[in-house]
Amino acid sequence: MTAIEPGCTVARYLALRLAELGITHLFGVPGNHLGPFLTTLRAEGDIEWVGTPTEGGAGQAADAFARIHGVGAAAVTYSVGAFNLLNACGGAYVERIPLVAVNASPPYEQWQNYRALGLLTSHMSPRPESNLDVYRQVTVDAQVISNPGLAPGQIDAALTACLTERRPVYLEVMEDLWDEPCPEPGAPIVPRERPFSARGRHMLDQAVQAVLTLVEEHPGPDGRPRPIVWAGEEIDRFRLGERLTDLVEATGVPFCTTVGAKAVVDEDLPQFHGVYNGGASHPDVHRIFKDWATCRIGLGAWSTSKNLGGASCVGGDWVMAANGGVSVGTSYFPDVQLELLLPALQDALVKAYGTGGLSADYFAESYAHHGSPGDRPAALEHHRAALSVGASRSRRTAGHHLTYDGVFDRINHFLNQDSGEDWTVVSDAAFSLIGSMNLSLPAGGFLSQVSWLSIGWSVGAATGAALAPGREYARPMVFVGDGAFQETCQELSTHTRLGIRSVVFVMDNGHFYGVEQMLVHPEYYAGRDAAAPDFYNVLHPWHYERLADVFAGRHTPANGVTVTDTRDLDDLLDRLTDPADPVNAGPLLVRVRLDRHDYPRAMAYKVPKEQAHG
């Protein structure tokens, strides 16, 4: 029998492997089963433990950390902690976020006692595989580690799957195994990508040719091609932002992004035409994407209800390259890797149309073709300018009631004209997401959970965003609805304890679930004389800004303010530019008072047209 060197244990092995992946922070809620691992983690010194108030918040933080850095991790204790983490893991699975979920379980001895005597101890279930079974539904690999000799192979297999599939994995480790000896780590953990075969080359060539044919068969009235690219989530997940930039700069082709891929590249690129989100798009963007462009090339974009915003399908003039294949009209080409498609398509378009041959300002072209209606921007630069209020002098008017659109117009101006700091905008679901999608941001400056849409995600996610290598210099700016904030408000405590200078805007629209009302009975928004909202959408009112006093400590400041009109908001934004102002010493909680009948303009398509207010 080969002797195992005592220098490595199961706990140390896992700690070394997580550090190897570049994980600098592990988020979670401790429990006795987890204690030995956390002690080892601290002794190693490469990974900092970040205790959060809730397991859900730990998962949200790990999710955002992974979106920025490439992989994240959370650790909890058996059953009571693991089931709370499950929601965040489910969201990471759906949205292709590499996340390592570590679940510390009762020791092997206790499981043996249960098998022999039926003795249950804390957190145990009569179904020994209960935790494993549920996590199998939301991971690409799930392992129970009960033998220290097998631990290295199980850990390595799970982490390899996490990197390869870009989805969560689950490691359940029995408490008495943490300090058991095991071999040292061997070869590095690397993704095992699908090989590119001769068959794959043939399929790629066919797909590229089909895209070219689609472009040629859908010219504009002047005979020129008029395609538009729709860049999506997989551009972010596969880290293809540079290749997308190369493609649009070499060809000149205009492009939009999905909401989930917002700010995957710099939004000041001259080819960027906005965020397309179906009927919930900005009206100007919807016009040029659906009505002016003659074909649409989706690159890494997912066909989700959020991305399509009211549409139930794409048409025959669409390309959709995602999930390992490419559909072109009614043809489908399986096993085409997105990272190979982008440069191949770039070369083919340049060969067919020349360098910059697809350059166009679709806003200007559409304006020239349709004449000069007052609601249509004359050029792309006019559309971008319309997304924020004008010069500071025009902002200094008497205070007016705040609206969703007015808030985000002012925030856009602040981010692009007034603030000297870098920010990461973290947007929650619902009206906050719809309102923030038209902010003009640099690459990497926007995070949102756009498919799973777990309300309250943003507050915990801001913790991970602030700590992730690559954007730790940027301040988080959070937009969250009042109902969503009530789900996860305690995660602001972590911001305070760590000194994260987040700015959390709680959009208080009169204490009710505005988007749920929009989805169930949009008639409510048709006019101020409409009936009261449905009873189940009404929230208990909170003084949100006062929570800052609850979380603040003697050496850990936090501040809370309320803004009720445009002057209040403008004054607050001015204060954010002053490093000496106390509001910038720690997290800032901002209660934004809005009218119950207000909603982002992008949601107007849901309101009955004959009654919708302007």
Image (cartoon, rainbow, N blue to C red):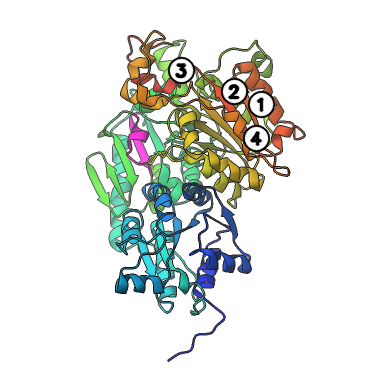
Which residue position is annotated with label 4? 549
* Three-letter amino acid code of the residue under disc 4: Asp
Which residue position is annotated with label 1? 573
Q: Earlier in the sequence, mark 3 or mark 2?
A: 2
Q: Earlier in the sequence, mark 4 or mark 1?
A: 4
Frontmost of labels 3 and 2 is 3
Q: CA gap, disc 4 to disc 2?
A: 27 Å
Numbered circle sitting on residue 486: none
Q: Residue furthest right?
A: 580
- Residue depicted at 60% across the width and 53% down the height: 469
* Three-letter amino acid code of the residue under disc 1: Leu
Give x and y (percent) for residue 376: 45, 16
Q: Residues within 10 Å of mark 2 (few under 14, many from 20)?
A: many
Q: Residues within 10 Å of mark 3 (few under 14, many from 20)?
A: some
Q: Which residues are magenta?
A: 292-309
Which residue position is annotated with label 3? 598
Q: CA gap, disc 1 to disc 3?
A: 22 Å
Which residue position is annotated with label 2? 410
Q: Earlier in the sequence, mark 1 or mark 3?
A: 1
